[in-house]
């Protein structure tokens, strides 16, 4: 009876981590295609491209390669590899895992070890095939969602992470994220704890749009770190921050996305007038058609300010000595630093936030 070595999970994991460290990858989710293109003797080709070159169907390609998802083809004479993959699989996460899996075969040199063109259950003894597949799967799992990086997130979030978080952060399937949660739970049962490594530090986790944030408890708007006053409803904020990706799914669904009436240029001025739609904007801050002040900034006027006529409002927009002049997003009703009204809100370019809030709340109730 033939015996085979055990699957070397430690080697698969080390190979995945070493590759990430060597390439200095620091962005999430990890781009598998970019990594594959680093290797001069490793190439990518879709099933439909290969089918076209062979003048056959994609189903015939899948049959030829003995997989509906993908395969690593090896030419021993040229030491050349091609990862073939089915780009028409419905799940993008599944495609990513397939690419990482085949990359694992390449890094672990399974084709060379077996001296086979393709790692296939039809070409290899069942025992050896299972070992190679387990190692490639383990490599893919650790490459796409490295445990040291997950430990980094855990340190930011008081040791809490769930299946949805891993799915969102690393762009893996719900099934893969479930396996990773199982790994973390197993580690916990054994009394083991994660430690920060070079790989943890390599990923600057707070620079991926994952900065600590909070939500306004009045209007459910997602706020950036250090926001003193909500720009939508003007409520003063308690500086307690959480990471957006660690919010529960139901909490995320309750977040409000308040409409922006127009796009702004780098100087904070509307590219198209939000009131009359004029596209021929002059160098000045006033729309030449309707007279709207086109820069949304702190007006210096509180909600209790009184105005006799429209000229008072224009003066407040242009020359108020009380404003901090902070530039604001086009949907901001209030200055996030001092709480004064924004120039767009002052001119009624923006309506009270409660109109949108109540409208969207009603829509969510109808959808339930």
Image (spheres, rainbow, N blue to C red):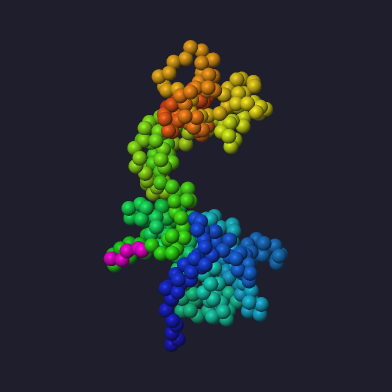
The quadrant in which the N terminus is found is bottom left
Q: On the rendered structure, is 202 left or right of 189?
A: right
Quadrant in which residue 357 is drawn: top left
Residue 5: where, in percent of width, then height?
44, 81
Is residue 366 shown in magenta?
A: no
Residue plotted at (61% across, 64% down):
37
Q: Residue furthest top?
A: 308
Task: Check the image and name the residue furthest to the front.
Answer: 321
Question: Residue farthest to the bottom?
Answer: 1
Residue 347 visible, this angle: no
Q: Is residue 78 above or below residue 28?
A: below
Q: Nearer the viewer, residue 311 or 347?
A: 311
Q: Nearer the viewer, residue 227 or 149?
A: 227
- Res. 316 in view: yes
Which residue is at 67% across, 62% downward? 49
- All told, the count of numbered labels is 0
Majority secondary structure of magenta residues: loop
Residue 303 on image: x %, y %: 41, 22
82 or 323, which lies in front? 323
In the rendered image, residue 280, in percent from the top left (x then y), is placed at 67, 27
Quick one: quadrant of the C terminus? top left
Q: Is residue 4 above or below residue 103?
A: below
Which residues, given as a range, are shown in magenta? 191-195
Relative to 319, residue 6 above or below: below
Does residue 63 appear left or right of residue 4 in this picture?
Answer: right
Name the residue: 44% across, 49% down: 210
Depth check: give the residue in front, 78 or 150: 150
Q: Is residue 194 magenta?
A: yes
Q: Residue at left 62%, top 32%?
A: 271
Q: Position of residue 360 (x, y in %)?
A: 44, 32
């Amino acid at each position: 009876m033939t015996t085979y070595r055990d699957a070397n999970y430690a080697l698969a994991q080390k190979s995945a981590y070493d590759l990430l460290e060597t390439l200095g990858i620091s962005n999430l989710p990890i781009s598998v295609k970019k990594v594959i293109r680093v290797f001069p003797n490793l190439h990518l080709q879709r099933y439909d491209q290969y089918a076209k070159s062979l003048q056959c169907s994609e189903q015939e390609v899948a049959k030829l390669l003995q997989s509906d998802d993908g395969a690593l083809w090896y030419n021993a004479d040229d030491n050349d590899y091609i990862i073939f993959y089915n780009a028409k699989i419905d799940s993008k996460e599944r495609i990513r895992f397939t690419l990482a899996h085949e990359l694992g075969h390449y890094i672990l040199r399974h084709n060379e070890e077996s001296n086979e063109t393709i790692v296939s259950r039809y070409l290899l003894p069942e025992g050896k095939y299972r070992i190679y597949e387990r190692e490639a799967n383990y490599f893919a799992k650790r490459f796409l969602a490295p445990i040291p990086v997950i430990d980094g997130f855990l340190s930011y979030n008081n040791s809490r992470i769930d299946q949805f978080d891993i799915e969102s952060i690393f762009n893996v399937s719900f099934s893969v994220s479930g396996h990773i949660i199982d790994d973390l739970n197993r580690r916990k049962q054994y009394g083991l704890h994660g430690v920060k490594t070079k790989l943890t530090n390599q990923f600057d986790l707070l620079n991926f749009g994952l900065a600590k944030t909070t939500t306004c408890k009045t209007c459910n708007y997602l706020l950036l770190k250090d926001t003193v006053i909500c720009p939508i409803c003007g409520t003063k904020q308690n500086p307690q921050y959480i990471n957006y990706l660690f919010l529960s799914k139901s909490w995320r669904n309750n977040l409000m996305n308040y409409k922006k009436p127009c796009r702004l240029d780098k100087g904070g001025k509307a590219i198209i007038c939000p009131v009359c739609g004029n596209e021929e904007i002059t160098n000045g801050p006033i729309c030449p058609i309707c007279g709207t002040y086109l820069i949304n900034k702190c007006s210096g006027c509180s909600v209790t300010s009184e105005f006799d006529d429209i000229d008072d409002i224009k003066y407040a927009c242009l020359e108020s000595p009380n404003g901090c002049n902070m530039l604001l997003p086009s949907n901001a009703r209030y200055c996030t630093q001092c709480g004064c009204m924004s120039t767009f809100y002052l001119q009624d370019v923006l309506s009270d936030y409660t109109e949108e809030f109540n409208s969207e709340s009603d829509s969510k109730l109808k959808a339930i």
